[in-house]
Image (cartoon, rainbow, N blue to C red):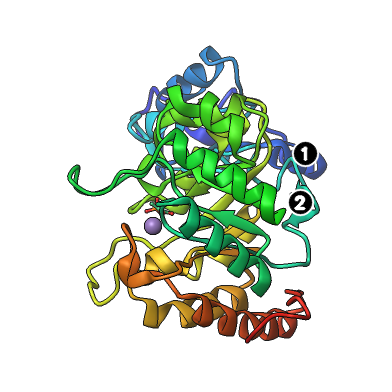
C-alpha cells in the first residue's frame, strides 16, 4: 500500500461500525455485493463506487481490516452488471443477491401459480396429464387418440400441426388443417388442446384454435416468438431447450411474462448429454430445482426424453415422484405407423395401463391423479 493512498481503514467513505442495525438494513436491501481484493486501496474502490452511481444505483461501501466490500442497492440491476464489475481493477468477486428473473421467481410472487384451463387447474394438487399424438396426421387418427386418452384420464389433448423436424425432408405437419382437426376433437371430447407455434407470424392463427401455446425446445430462446405469445391471452407451455441452463430457461419464461402473460408452464423434456442410449437425458432434478426457484408449474415430457417407448413409463413415474405438476405423453393409435416420433409413442393399452401407476405415485407424494371410473386398464 503506498504512503500517499489512504488505507481502507482511513477511508473518508462513511462507515459507522457501531451501528449494527444500520449495517443490517443495508445488507437487507442489497441487490449485489462487490467483494474487493484484500488490501485494495481507496483509489481503486472509488471508480467502482462512481460506476455504480453513474448507473443510478446506490453504493454502500463497507470497509474492514484490509478488506472492503461494496453493497449495490437499486433495481432493476442490468443483467450484465456482474460481468461489468468482475473485470474492474481491484474486484475479487461479485455476488448477485437479487435474481435476474423477477416475474418467474418467488421473490415477488410468494404463491404457486395455478393456471385454470376450463375445469383443469394446472399447478394445483392434482397432477395434470396431457396426451396425444406427436403430430396431427388425419382426423380419424386424432379423434381416436382424443377419445382414448380422455377415457384413460388425460385432461388435455396434444398434437402438432406445425412440426419442427430435425430434417427438412420429414413430415412437417398439416398446418391450419391440423388446427381444425384439433378443434373438432375438442368439440367431440371436451378435452382442451395444446399445439406448437413455431413462428411469431403464426401466433395469431394458432391462437384462434388452441387453448395452450406450446413453444418447442428448439424455440425456447426464440425471443421474438416468446414476446409474441407473451402478448397473447392464452397459457404458454415452454419446453426446455436442448442445452439450456435452468436459469436461462427461467429467463426465457421471463420474456413471455414481461409482455403481460403470467401463465407459463415449464416442461422438462430431456437435455442433450454425452449419453446416447436414450434420445435425451431426462433431468428429473429440474423439477425440485425449478420449484425452489420459481412459482411456475413444471411438467415432465418422458416421451422426448426417452425416445423409446419401453422407457417412457419409468420416466413418467419418476417425474411424478419428483413432484411434477403434470406430464405430457405421446400416444398414438398405431405407433409403428406414426408420421413422427412413433418409436417413443405409447399405444392406447400402454397408456391406459400406465395411468393407474402414475395415480398411485401421485398419491404417495400427496398429490392426486384421478382415473375415470370406466377406464379400461
Ligand atoms: C413435441 O412435443 O412433439 C416436440 C417437438 O417436442 P420438443 O420441442 O420438446 O422436441
Ligand atoms: Mn414429438
Q: Mark 1 Cα within 10 Å, few/some/many (few <14, many 20+)? A: few
Picture coordinates of residue 85 (x, y %)? 41, 31
Distance (Cα) linking label 1 and label 2: 34 Å
Does 308 sit above or below residue 6? below
Helix, strand or loop under label 2: loop
Q: Is residue 296 visible?
A: no
* x then y, percent, for residue 357: 62, 86
The relative height of residue 7 versus residue 338 in the rendered view (above or below) is: above
Q: Quadrant of residue 231?
A: top right
SS class of the residue under badge 1?
A: helix
Above or below, 373 against 162 in this view is: below
- Of labels 1 and 2, earlier in sequence is 1
> Residue at (47%, 21%) from the top-left corner?
46
Q: Is mark 1 within 8 Å of ligand 1?
A: no
Q: Quadrant of the N terminus?
A: top left
- Identify residue for label 2: 114
Q: What residue is shown at x 72% (from left), y 36% (from top)? A: 29
Q: Position of residue 348 (x, y in %)?
A: 52, 75
Depth check: give the residue in front, 201 or 2: 201
Is residue 22 among the parts visible in the rendering? yes
Residue at image x 75%, y 43%?
A: 109
Left or right of 262? Residue 331 is left
Residue 157: percent from left, percent from top: 59, 56
Q: Residue at x 42, y 57 (%)?
A: 134
Residue located beneath label 1 in the image: 25
Q: Which mark is residue 47?
A: none
Amino acid at each position: 500500500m503506498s504512503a500517499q493512498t489512504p488505507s481502507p481503514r482511513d477511508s473518508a467513505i462513511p462507515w459507522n461500525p457501531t451501528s449494527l442495525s444500520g449495517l443490517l438494513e443495508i445488507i437487507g436491501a442489497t441487490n449485489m455485493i462487490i467483494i474487493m481484493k484484500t488490501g485494495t486501496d481507496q483509489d481503486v474502490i472509488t471508480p467502482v463506487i462512481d460506476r455504480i452511481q453513474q448507473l443510478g444505483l446506490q453504493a454502500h461501501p463497507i470497509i474492514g481490516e484490509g478488506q472492503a466490500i461494496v453493497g449495490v442497492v437499486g433495481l432493476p440491476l442490468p443483467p450484465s452488471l456482474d460481468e461489468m464489475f468482475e473485470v474492474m481493477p481491484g474486484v475479487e468477486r461479485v455476488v448477485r443477491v437479487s435474481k435476474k428473473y423477477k416475474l418467474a421467481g418467488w421473490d415477488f410472487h410468494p404463491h404457486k401459480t395455478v393456471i385454470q384451463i376450463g375445469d383443469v387447474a394446472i399447478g394445483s394438487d392434482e397432477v395434470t396429464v396431457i396426451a396425444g399424438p406427436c403430430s396431427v396426421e388425419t382426423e380419424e387418427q386424432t379423434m381416436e387418440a382424443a377419445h382414448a386418452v380422455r377415457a384413460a384420464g388425460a385432461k388435455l389433448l396434444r398434437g402438432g400441426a406445425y412440426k419442427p423436424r430435425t430434417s427438412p425432408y420429414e413430415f412437417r405437419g398439416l398446418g391450419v388443417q391440423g388446427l381444425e382437426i384439433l378443434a373438432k376433437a375438442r368439440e367431440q371430447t371436451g378435452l382442451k388442446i395444446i399445439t406448437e407455434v413455431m413462428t411469431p407470424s403464426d401466433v395469431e392463427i394458432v391462437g384462434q384454435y388452441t387453448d395452450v401455446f406450446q413453444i418447442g425446445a428448439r424455440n425456447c430462446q426464440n425471443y421474438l416468438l416468446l414476446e409474441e405469445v407473451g402478448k397473447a391471452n392464452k397459457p404458454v407451455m415452454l419446453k426446455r431447450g436442448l442445452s439450456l441452463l435452468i436459469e436461462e430457461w427461467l429467463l426465457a419464461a421471463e420474456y413471455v411474462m414481461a409482455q403481460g402473460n403470467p401463465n407459463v408452464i415449464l416442461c422438462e423434456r430431456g437435455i442433450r448429454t454425452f449419453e446416447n442410449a436414450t434420445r435425451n437425458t431426462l433431468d428429473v432434478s429440474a423439477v425440485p430445482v425449478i420449484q425452489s426457484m420459481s412459482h411456475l408449474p413444471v411438467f415432465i415430457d418422458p416421451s422426448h426424453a426417452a425416445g423409446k417407448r419401453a422407457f417412457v413409463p419409468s420416466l413418467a413415474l419418476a417425474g411424478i415422484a419428483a413432484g411434477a405438476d403434470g406430464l405430457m405423453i405421446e400416444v398414438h393409435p398405431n405407433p409403428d405407423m406414426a408420421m413422427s416420433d412413433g418409436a417413443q409413442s405409447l399405444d392406447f393399452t400402454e397408456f391406459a395401463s400406465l395411468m393407474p401407476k402414475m395415480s398411485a405415485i401421485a398419491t404417495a407424494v400427496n398429490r392426486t391423479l384421478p382415473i375415470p371410473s370406466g377406464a379400461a386398464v
